[in-house]
Image (cartoon, helix red, strand yellow):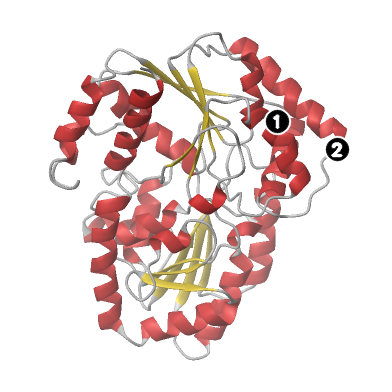
Amino acid sequence: MTTARLDAYRDVAPKGTIEFLRCLAARVRGRSFLHVNSARHGGGVAEILHRLVPLITELGVDARWEVIKGNPAFYTATKAFHNALQGREQTITSQMLDDYVSTNRACAERLSLEADLVLIHDPQPAPLIESRPTNGKWVWRCHIDLSSPQRRAWRLLRKYVSKYDAAIFSLPKFAQRLRIPQFLVYPSIDPLSDKNRELPKAEVDAILERLAVPRDKPTLLQVSRFDRFKDPIGVIDAYRIVKKHNDCRLVLAGGGADDDPEGAAVLTEVREAAGQDPDIHVLELPPNAHLEINALQRAATIVLQKSLREGFGLTVAEALWKGKPVVGGVAGGLAVQVIYELTGYTVNSVEGAAFRIRYLLNNPDLIAKMGNAGREYVRREFLITRHLSDYLTMLVLLTQ
């Protein structure tokens, strides 16, 4: 994967951003910064780290990225934790806890965890704190929706999180009662990556032809992992209501993640719900299908993200960057990105989603207006250059 150099962002980031980043980096040059998560591919965290780590390195910081790995029992346990922490009732057995803790203990022996600042991403590697070296600051970075966790699951995780020097959340409502400092950091998209860079119309057309998605009618698109929290069945239900009045097609595009064992079952459910409708396209894409997602988002008329629970939902920022209005759920960070009547609409039900989709399809001028507003909003708030400044600031604050 080729990563753009920092100067390449001058034309897309707000004015003065690159100069500010270089001044900030001068204060932490030579320090070490380690990221640890549970998947090298698939999901928003891995995607962000693929782009951020090289840029941090370019600015003179010794940045590294390590990944913990486990057996299927470990991923079953961490998926149960993930679901429980996002509010779904789960049974977490003592065997699951043993698999969770023992895998982290084994990974700690394998990994090099020495750094001035160590950022541990999400619940999967949280127990690594038990093996922290003597030196360095450790911060737990939570990307998921912790607004209403299953209390037992949070109690189990909190005993590890409380041992960190600080915690980072994506939204204020995700924060928990902890005795350690807490920070707010929005995730980000890379406007120069294959998923978000400009694509010529001919390239978009060629990719959609290869994916067998015609462009003969308005297209509704949801891009996400096949996960019940993303409510793909609800998206199909909303499409069927719209279809009674507006001829359109629906594309559900996504895949799995290395640490998600439920994706295949959800994909099967989605295909069964789609049935034989020729205007529903269910696309199972590999983790590196960045150009395909880019083309689909650029070809879409309206982008959906009808999540029931969501950490942040960067597919919304991706769509807004491409000038598309978004109809999304009110979960997690979606409401931060979907500004009602400005960049799209947030909805609470299948019927509400269908109503807003129809309203937009019947008002094409509004689609264009919202698209322009959305792109500028992302430029100010959700580009990787802003994310980079947040992490450099943490290095300054925590590693004096």
Give the residue type that dot 1 points to: Lys
Tell me which label, 1 or 2, sits earlier in the chain: 2
Placement of the C terminus among the 4 image quadrants: top left
Residue at 74 percent of width and 39 percent of height: 155
Instruction: List the residue tagged with mark 1.
Output: 159
Return the mark for residue 93.
2
Q: Nearer the viewer, residue 344 or 172?
A: 172
With 156 as the anchor, is 109 left or right in this view?
A: left
Where residue 119 sits in the image (x, y, percent)? Answer: 49, 27
Taking the image as drawn, is residue 391 in sight? yes
Give the residue type that dot 2 points to: Thr
- Tell me the crowding category of disc 2: few under 14, some 14 to 19, or many 20 or more residues within 10 angstroms, Cα based: few
Helix, strand or loop at label 1? It is helix
- Tell me the crowding category of disc 1: few under 14, some 14 to 19, or many 20 or more residues within 10 angstroms, Cα based: few
Placement of the N terminus among the 4 image quadrants: top left
In this view, 380 is above or below 306: above
Q: Residue furthest right?
A: 94
Where residue 381 sits in the image (x, y, percent)? Answer: 30, 51
With 118 as the anchor, is 263 left or right in this view?
A: right
Return the mark for residue 44.
none
